[in-house]
Image (cartoon, rainbow, N blue to C red):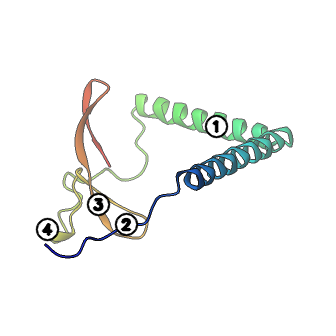
Amino acid sequence: LGPQVWLPAINESHTEQVRVEILKKELLLAKIARKRHLEAQRSGWGAELARSRSEGVLAVRSAAAAKDLSVHIGTPQAAKPNAGLAPQQRQGKHMMVQGDGRARMLSRVFLNGKWTYAA
C-alpha cells in the first residue's frame, strides 16, 4: 500500500452560509421578476397579449370553418414529402431539427392516453 492521502476538511458552517446566500439571491431575483411582470401587465402588456391570443383563436376557428366547407387553400401535401431527398437527409416523425440546423431524435412516449413523440 502506498502513502495515505489526506483530504481537506469540509467546513460545514461555511458551506451552509454559501447555500443560504444562494437561496436568498434566488428569492430576491424571483421577487424582482414578479414585480417587473406586474408592472408590465399594468402598463398594457396584458391587454396586447390577450388581444393577440383572441386573434389566434379566431384564425384557428376560421381555418376550421373553411376546412369544413371543403375550401382548399394552397397546394395539396405530397404523399411522401421527403421523397426527393437522400435517405440520410430525410426527417421522419421520430426526428426534429433544432433552430441551428442540428437534428435530434425524439422518443416515443405514452402521454395522456395516446402514443406521441417527445424530445
Whichever of labels 4 and 3 marks the residue nearer the N terminus, that label is 4
Which mark is on residue 53? Answer: 1
Question: Marks 4 and 3, how far apart in space?
Answer: 16 Å
Whichever of labels 1 and 2 marks the residue nearer the N terminus, that label is 2
Label 1: few (<14), some (14–19) or many (≥20) C-alpha neighbours in 10 Å: few
Which mark is on residue 87? Answer: 4
**What secondary structure is marked by label 3?**
strand
Question: Marks 3 and 2, how far apart in space?
Answer: 42 Å
Q: Where's the N terminus, which quadrant?
A: bottom left
Residue 98 position within the rendered picture, expressed as x and y whole percent measured from the top left: 38, 62
Name the amino acid type tagged 3: Arg
Identify the residue shown where x is 47% and y is 58%.
10
**What secondary structure is marked by label 4?**
helix
C-beta proximity under 8 Å, tags 4 and 3: no
Residue 59 position within the rendered picture, expressed as x and y whole percent measured from the top left: 57, 38
**What secondary structure is marked by label 2?**
loop
Viewer-closest of 30 and 45: 30
Whichever of labels 3 and 2 marks the residue nearer the N terminus, that label is 2
Which mark is on residue 104? Answer: 3
Identify the residue shown where x is 49% and y is 36%.
63
Residue 88 position within the rendered picture, expressed as x and y whole percent measured from the top left: 16, 70
Name the amino acid type tagged 2: Leu
> What residue would you read off at disc 2?
7
- Left or right: residue 18 versus residue 66 is right
